[in-house]
Amino acid sequence: MPSPKAKSSGGRSSSSPGVGGNGRYEFMSLNRRPPQHLLQRQGSDPTSTRLRASESPTRRRGSGSSNASTSSTGGQLPEEDCMRLNPSIVGITLSSLLAMDLWLSKRLGVCACEDSSWGSMRPLMKLIEISGHGIPWLAGTAYCLYKSDSTAGQEVMLNLLMALVLDLILVGVVKAVVRRRRPAHNRMDMFATFSVDGYSFPSGHATRAAMCARFLLAHLVLAAPLRVLVLLWAVLVGFSRVLLGRHHVTDVAFGFGMGYCQYNLVEVLWMSPAILHGLIRQLA
Ligand SMILES: CC(C)=CCC/C(C)=C/COP(=O)(O)O
């Protein structure tokens, strides 16, 4: 919209800034050079002088040569100026996705408390939550390691223990860096949490579920129905996070991706029996 200031100068001749020959206001395209008569008028207009003074350093830096490059590229702005437009498009896309995420997560939080629409399912969801919690996994793996009498079994369990600790560290670091708050409808009544677990992104249960599912499928000889059950469990753990109102959908989606990738890291860092024997000898 033209500013009142521009309107007040409407009585000038048709060469006034932004006013076309037919007395109508003209809008300038961002990637075109304004007509010469507008540039000349801007030089004497204090408002436009202020605007130009507030231009970014990139724009100012490029202005000397951009005139040359503008004319040589047929009225196009230099590439650096065009790239300045992109963050706003990315920003708008991201905020739209974020708004959708908040809306969807709120709608799906149907077990967030007892009087929610699926509140009666809350105890079952909390059971699934415990099945993906760090403490039962750490304790169960340590117990299996202690009970295992084969070298292969010990190797697998020790590596799983290492994977679980790695997962806690990596999730803790990302949570501490991102510091996204949990959904407003979440009731923070989770069993055994660290301080970073006050944060939402990513879901530690989702990373653990994805990583452990991949680990179990790769290292345990399981019949087909059991393999399906392992996958189903991982998906259920992820879903339960949103249904309980603990997480946004994106926390769980990212958590699954992160857990999947963490397993690749575990494979790279895999401790072979030789390394393990060396470690045990050093500890003994
Ligand atoms: C105390 C130990 C050993 C682990 C904490 C596990 C925990 C509570 C993770 C939080 O998961 P979400 O990020 O999915 O809520």
Image (cartoon, rainbow, N blue to C red):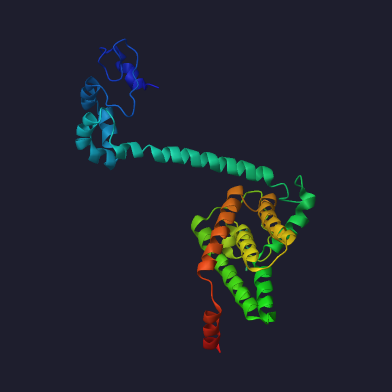
Seen from this angle, which residue lies furthest right? 120
Is residue 200 at all visible to an observer of this figure? no
- Which sits in the foreground, 14 or 227? 227
Quadrant of the frame with the N terminus:
top left
In which image quadrant can residue 7 be found? Answer: top left
176 and 8: which one is in front?
176
x and y, in percent, of residue 246 in the image: 65, 53
Residue 144 visible in this rendered orientation of the protein: yes
Is 11 in front, or is 188?
188
Q: Quadrant of residue 82?
A: top left
| Residue sitting at x 69%, y 77% | 143
User: Going 25% across and 31% down the picture, which residue do you hit?
Assistant: 73
In-image side of 60 versus 239 (left or right)? left
| For residue 114, above or below residue 165 | above
- The C terminus is located in which quarter? bottom right
User: Where residue 205 sits in the image (x, y, percent)?
Assistant: 63, 59
Residue at 30% from the left image edge and 16% from the top image edge: 19
Q: Residue at x 27, y 12 (%)?
A: 14
Please identify the residue farthest to the top as the structure is shown.
22
- Residue 241 drawn at (x, y percent): 66, 54
Ligand 1 sits in quadrant: bottom right
Q: Is residue 148 above or below residue 207?
A: below
Tell me where residue 96 appears, x and y as whole percent: 53, 39
How many numbered discs sit on the rendered protein? 0
